[in-house]
DNA sequence: CCCGATAGTTGAATTTATTCAAGCATAAAG
DNA sequence: CTTTATGCTTGAATAAATTCAACTATCGGG
């Protein structure tokens, strides 16, 4: 474990505090990484599948092009990814009214269910976290409450 | 963003608190995921490479078999992974005294440098975190200080 | 010394991921 | 109404990841 966040006696700068906080989070991440691998395996999803699945929606139909941009890949790769999900019945291609060139992608009901189940599984706290006392967890929650504000 | 950690008026159970905390961390994770992808790309490492690199050491020579076990793959896959790192001069295979069947793997000096640089880059806090006030970061650090204890 | 188990490599096969060039249909601009 | 640009798909090529079967070398017990 790396002590990038080794505490010194003098008061820490903001950058140092951020580095400490991130190190604490990141190291916990690494330590609990296998759990998430196992979840994906249980769902029969590759990392790519889950990335795609999580960025899709049942409401907001997204064009192939915008998906390729969001996934930082070329259009041809997006076609391939969507093909795989479509073959499994998780997504559906739709024509769009104004422009017959573009195709949009939405989650099917199976896709919605899969995404919800995956999300729930991934949000299940790693067992390591349950070793922390209730009081300490409360402190963490209160402190971390400032995080969500950042995520647009 | 999922409100698995929606606060209710009654006092939360430990499990609920853990779920909230993990959701806060996990969502932050997801939101800052691209940054880590870019770091790997900058280093010219695949996710597999970095996983392998991070589990290796210059001090503790590990046998191919134990590496395969640690990486949850078969021996043949471990051979392939180590081959790739070896071709790049990051690791070195060594014979072991007692048993001429086993080969151990250690980081070369280049491997040590690469691992250190990668570690440093990955421990660099995401810019989003710097939007949090110094006081709030301090609170996070103090609260999260209970985490490292868990990581054997 | 032989024999079965063990450690690792090799080769073939498959899946996942990615990029590039070519092509097709449609749209938009002149 | 031709030309050019756009959105997507297809096909080929390649790299990354993974598994399986076969093989080599070595170890350890009888």
Image (cartoon, coloured by chain):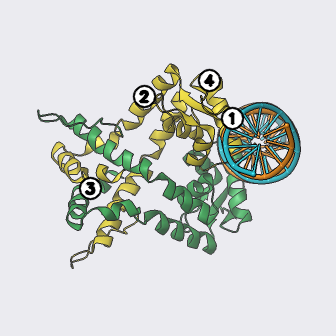
Chain colours: A green, B yellow, C orange, D cyan
Residue A136 relative to residue A109: left or right: left
Q: CA distance from mark 3 to mark 2?
A: 28 Å
Q: Work out whether mark 2 precedes mark 1 in sequence or the reverse, and give the earlier one.
A: 1
Q: CA distance from mark 3 to mark 4?
A: 41 Å
Q: Which residue is mark 3?
A: A144
Dots 3, 1 in contact, CB < 8 A: no
In terms of secondary structure, where does tag 3 sit?
helix
What mark, if any, has residue A98 been given in the picture? Answer: none
The percent coordinates of residue A118 (x first, y second) are 53, 66
In terms of secondary structure, where does tag 4 sit?
loop
Q: Nearer the viewer, mark 1 or mark 4?
A: 1
Label 3 and label 2 in one chain = no
The percent coordinates of residue D29 (x first, y second) are 69, 49
Residue at the far bottom in the pictured view: B10
In terms of secondary structure, where does tag 1 sit?
loop
Q: Which residue is mark 2?
A: B116
Label 2 and label 1 in one chain = yes
Q: Which residue is mark 1?
A: B101
Dots 1, 4 in contact, CB < 8 A: no
Residue A104 relative to residue A38: left or right: right
What mark, if any, has residue B88 been given in the picture? Answer: 4
Label 3 and label 4 in one chain = no
Q: Residue at x 58, y 57 (%)?
A: A50
Q: Does A34 sit above or below residue B7?
A: above
Circle 2 chain? B
Q: CA distance from mark 1 to mark 4?
A: 24 Å
Q: Residues within 10 Å of mark 1 (few under 14, many from 20)?
A: few
Where the N terminus of chain A falls, by quadrant? top left
Dots 2, 1 in contact, CB < 8 A: no
Q: Does A6 sit above or below residue A140?
A: above
Q: Pick whichever, A127 or A42, lies toward us.
A: A127
């Amino acid at each position: 474990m790396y002590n990038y966040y080794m505490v010194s006696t003098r008061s820490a700068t903001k950058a140092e505090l951020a580095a400490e906080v991130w190190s604490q989070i990141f190291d916990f991440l690494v330590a609990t990484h296998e759990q998430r691998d196992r979840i994906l395996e249980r769902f029969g999803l590759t990392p790519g599948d889950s990335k795609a699945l999580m960025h899709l929606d049942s409401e907001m139909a997204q064009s192939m092009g915008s998906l390729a941009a969001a996934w930082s890949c070329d259009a041809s790769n997006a076609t391939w990814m969507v093909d795989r999900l479509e073959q499994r019945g998780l997504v559906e291609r739709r024509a769009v009214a104004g422009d017959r060139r573009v195709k949009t992608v939405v989650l099917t009901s199976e896709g919605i269910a899969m995404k919800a189940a995956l999300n729930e599984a991934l949000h299940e706290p790693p067992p390591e976290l349950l070793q922390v006392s209730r009081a300490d967890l409360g402190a963490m929650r209160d402190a971390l409450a400032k995080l969500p504000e950042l995520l647009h």
